[in-house]
């Protein structure tokens, strides 16, 4: 089923400049080979974002290419229930006949697609088009819903547009103060730290709000160790102090914003003593943070998943945007609000139509003008385009459910670029739902935990084996260049999507001579939309170290900095929304007395499909460790390295303990990169933000249980 004897990778000794397969920093790197299977990776010093630096995941990324567990043939599930090798024809036939029969019996929307933010722009675009044109299903969503959707929703409602960072990362180095609200880039984007180092060297200050003393917080001038789920209260409290002390930018508020009065009225009740009580952050620290921001000539507020992955995520981000606007930061030099996007193509992946409510160019699928424009580019009848579908968790939650008058279940699912059996919240439910499907097909390079459940697995080409574009966290569109061929038997996702469309009788809409042609069509489909790529071409990207969208025509240089003169809202002003602190969906009680929060560590990536297969990385981090404070450990008579079982209302999982003073006494932290008995997501709460539909990965209530019979790795 996998090949232990992969042929050596044929890479030219001449270096190919491409980008790392993993996170949104998209470090520039060069790949070269000796033809014997040895691949040399080097940081690309000429690429202006990472400037040659890579983290340990980037340095070791080539190990995924020739890995012995690489899938090199399609797999199909036999009548006896086992996965066996099959031909491409057999596998694709099975997919098409399963999709057809499900749609005949239950309607078009009964086939669903789950995409990912690691897919190139071209693949994200094609997957959205495949759903709407070849399958005509409304039900397509993607893992960015777990990642980006709260910041995106808050950005759109205030600024009229969502681009994670409205400025290049290099601006960070020149900001007097940077406030990180729930980001840990020292582990999640290490090469970004060079800009923080520069900023510090220029006398700048760093403030970090995180329940843990992370490697990022260790580098901060001020660490606000807030109680999980209290971000909006904290930020409202800072704004309260700034208004009280006359430090807001009255002129900017009058000229460039609307809605400040209601925000001001709301934050009057967030006096420091009350905010200290809610957040656990001492009043003196609140005042210091507010005054650092209020007296700085330039400042940035950057949110990460810590503030966003909550059932109040949109409110948390809106509170940060209010703060940035009140200080007059947005659109000012070396200042502003931004979100550090996470996945390799987390930015582009949310712009081209793999989101349930969107069409390419970040257009809304329920906007008649947008539908007309995109239908014309696709050469289909506008009325044939489905409407909005279910959001990611709601899609997973409806799998295999019987049709009722109110709702219809999805019976067949295609997964491309996500490992939901590890990364979705409330895994016990998700596993049950996946099991209730009539048919599951997964495209992946390895037999991920999700692929292992599939009826058909299609082996995909990887990053260095395919061409396309990615859009990094700054909104810079860059090229993923092909350095080598995929192993024999493996096909790239573009070819697979187009072939499936052909077999579904829609081939004429999926005829492309090259990946570049797909990009050109994507440009036309995006023209006039918020994320306008129509003026970007491969040659322009090559000539400019990438091009920042929006870029509406061939002569346009791209837009590194947004909002310098106005906002793309009806009034041209930024909109402020009053935010009320609300409790997380679950808070500790006598049965579940601790907060559980989850996140990442340096050497593992996401669901771990790739990085758990790389020896250098598993040597650094072999299994998930549950971080607890020494006083909590003492309370349970536990010591560092002991195995424990964590339990929440949804499930149990086993971990070894890491006892550290770096975490709050009321909080346990677990990284989510592992599956099975050590999956953090057996514990997490799928409570959704009402606007963004983002699950509350960052806060739930947990307890530490019996310490015998646990299932940790040796
Ligand atoms: N090594 C590594 N790097 C990655 C990834 C990876 O898996 N591994 N994934 C990439 C992706 S997709 C993403 S989205 C980014 C994520 O990048 P980050 O947002 O930096 O990562 P997280 O660890 O999810 O969360 C950040 C911090 O939020 C804190 N936190 C927990 N609860 C709260 C809270 O209630 N409020 C606040 N303010 N903070 C809280 C956590 O303690 C954690 O330190 O990383 C990208 N880079
Ligand atoms: N508890 C908890 N859970 C979380 C989070 C958290 O902080 N805490 N964070 C959430 C966030 S921010 C994210 S982004 C998600 C990420 O979680 P996932 O959606 O599971 O993301 P990955 O692990 O990157 O999964 C990508 C899968 O697709 C494969 N793959 C990668 N690139 C391609 C490609 O180009 N083509 C194909 N066919 N396959 C590909 C990989 O091998 C892997 O199996 O997890 C979310 N889950
Ligand atoms: S920071 Fe992100 S893009 Fe850069 S090498 Fe590490 S994982 Fe790759
Ligand atoms: Mo993410």
Image (tube, rainbow, N blue to C red):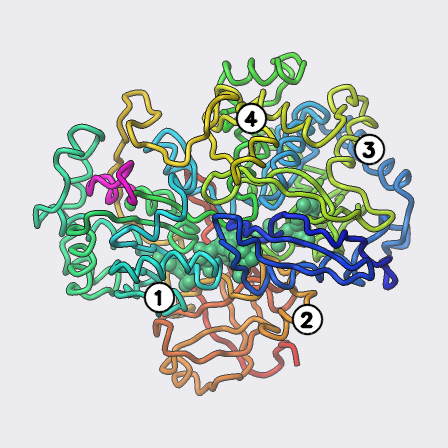
> Image quadrant of residue 132?
top right
Which corner quadrant of the figure contains ligand 3? bottom right
Image location (x, y in percent) of residue 455: 80, 47
Give the residue at mark 3.
96
Task: Tell me the distance, in whole angstroms, between the alpha carbons under discs 4 and 3.
Answer: 24 Å
Q: CA distance from mark 3 to mark 2?
A: 38 Å
In the image: residue 630, left or right of residue 566: right
Q: Are marks 1 and 4 in contact (CB under 8 Å)?
A: no
Using the image, tell me which numbered label, if any, was put on residue 615. 2
What secondary structure prevails in the magenta region? loop
Distance, label 2 to label 4, CA atoms, is 41 Å
Q: Residue at x 69, y 42 (%)?
A: 400
Give the extent of the magenta segment.
321-335
Which residue position holds label 1? 217
State the image coordinates of residue 26 (x, y, percent, origin top left). 55, 49
- The image's mark for residue 359 is 4
Front: mark 4 or 3: 4
The quarter of the picture where the N terminus appears is: bottom right
Q: How many marks?
A: 4
Q: Earlier in the sequence, mark 1 or mark 2?
A: 1
Between disc 3 and disc 2, whose residue precedes?
A: 3
Circle 1 — which element? Answer: helix
């Amino acid at each position: 089923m996998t090949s232990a004897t992969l042929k050596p990778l044929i890479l030219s000794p001449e270096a190919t400049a491409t980008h790392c397969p993993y996170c949104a920093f998209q470090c520039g790197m060069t790949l070269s080979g000796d033809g014997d299977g040895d691949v040399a990776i080097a940081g690309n010093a000429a690429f202006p974002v990472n400037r040659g630096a890579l983290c340990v995941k980037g340095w070791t990324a080539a190990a995924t290419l020739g890995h012995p567990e690489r899938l090199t043939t399609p797999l199909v599930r036999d009548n006896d229930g086992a996965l066996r090798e099959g031909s491409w024809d057999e596998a694709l036939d099975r997919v098409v006949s399963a999709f057809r029969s499900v749609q005949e019996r239950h309607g078009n929307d009964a086939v669903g697609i789950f995409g990912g933010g690691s897919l190139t722009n071209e693949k994200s675009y094609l997957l959205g088009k495949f759903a709407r044109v070849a399958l005509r299903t409304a039900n397509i969503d993607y893992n960015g819903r777990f990642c980006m959707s709260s910041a995106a929703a808050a950005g759109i409602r205030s600024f009229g547009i969502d681009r994670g960072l409205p400025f290049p990362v290099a601006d960070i180095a020149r900001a007097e103060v940077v406030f990180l609200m729930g980001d840990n880039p020292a582990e999640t984007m290490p090469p970004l730290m060079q800009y923080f180092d520069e900023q510090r060297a220029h006398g700048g200050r760093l403030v970090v709000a995180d329940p843990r003393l992370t490697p990022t917080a260790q580098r901060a001038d001020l660490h606000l160790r807030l109680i999980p789920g209290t971000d909006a209260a904290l930020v409202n409290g800072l704004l309260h102090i700034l208004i009280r002390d006359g430090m807001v930018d009255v002129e900017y508020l009058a000229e460039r914003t609307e809605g400040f009065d209601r925000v001001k009225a709301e934050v009057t009740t967030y006096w420091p003593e009350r905010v200290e009580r809610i957040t656990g952050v001492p009043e003196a620290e609140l005042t210091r943070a507010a005054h650092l921001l209020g007296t700085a000539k330039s400042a940035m507020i950057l949110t990460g998943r810590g503030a966003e992955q909550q059932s109040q995520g949109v409110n948390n981000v809106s509170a940060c945007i209010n703060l940035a606007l009140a200080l007059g930061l947005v659109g000012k030099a070396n200042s502003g609000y931004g979100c550090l996007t996470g996945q390799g193509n987390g930015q582009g992946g949310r712009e081209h139509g793999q989101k349930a409510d969107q069409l390419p160019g970040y257009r809304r699928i329920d906007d008649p003008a947008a539908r007309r424009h995109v239908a014309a580019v696709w050469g289909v009848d506008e009325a044939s385009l489905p409407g909005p579908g279910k959001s990611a968790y709601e899609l997973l939650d409806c799998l295999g459910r019987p049709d009722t008058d109110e709702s219809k279940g999805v019976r067949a699912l295609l997964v491309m670029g996500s490992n939901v059996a590890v990364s979705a919240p409330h895994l016990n439910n998700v596993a049950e739902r996946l099991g209730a499907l009539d048919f599951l097909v997964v495209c992946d390079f390895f037999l991920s935990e999700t692929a292992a459940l599939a009826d058909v697995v299609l082996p995909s080409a990887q990053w260095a084996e395919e061409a396309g574009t990615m859009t990094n966290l700054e909104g810079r569109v860059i090229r993923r260049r092909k350095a080598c061929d995929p192993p024999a038997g493996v096909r790239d996702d573009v070819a697979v999507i187009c072939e499936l469309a052909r077999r579904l009788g829609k081939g004429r809409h999926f005829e492309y001579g090259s990946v570049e042609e797909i990009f050109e069509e994507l440009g036309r489909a995006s023209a006039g939309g918020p994320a306008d790529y129509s003026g970007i071409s491969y040659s322009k990207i090559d000539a400019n170290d990438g091009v920042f969208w929006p870029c509406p025509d061939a002569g346009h240089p791209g837009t590194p900095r947004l909002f310098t003169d106005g906002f793309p809202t009806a009034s041209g002003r930024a909109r402020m929304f009053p935010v009320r602190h609300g409790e997380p969906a679950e808070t500790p009680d006598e049965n579940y007395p601790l907060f559980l929060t989850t996140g990442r560590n340096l050497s593992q990536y996401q669901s771990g499909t790739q990085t758990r297969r790389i020896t250098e990385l598993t040597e650094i981090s072999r299994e998930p460790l549950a971080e607890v404070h020494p006083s909590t450990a003492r309370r349970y008579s536990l010591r560092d390295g002991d195995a424990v079982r964590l339990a929440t209302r949804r499930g149990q999982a086993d971990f070894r303990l890491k006892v550290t003073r770096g975490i709050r006494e009321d909080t346990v932290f677990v990284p989510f990169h592992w599956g099975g008995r050590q999956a953090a997501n057996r514990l997490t709460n799928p409570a959704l933000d009402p606007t963004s539909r983002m699950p509350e990965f960052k806060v739930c209530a947990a307890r530490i249980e019996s310490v015998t019979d646990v299932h940790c790795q040796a």
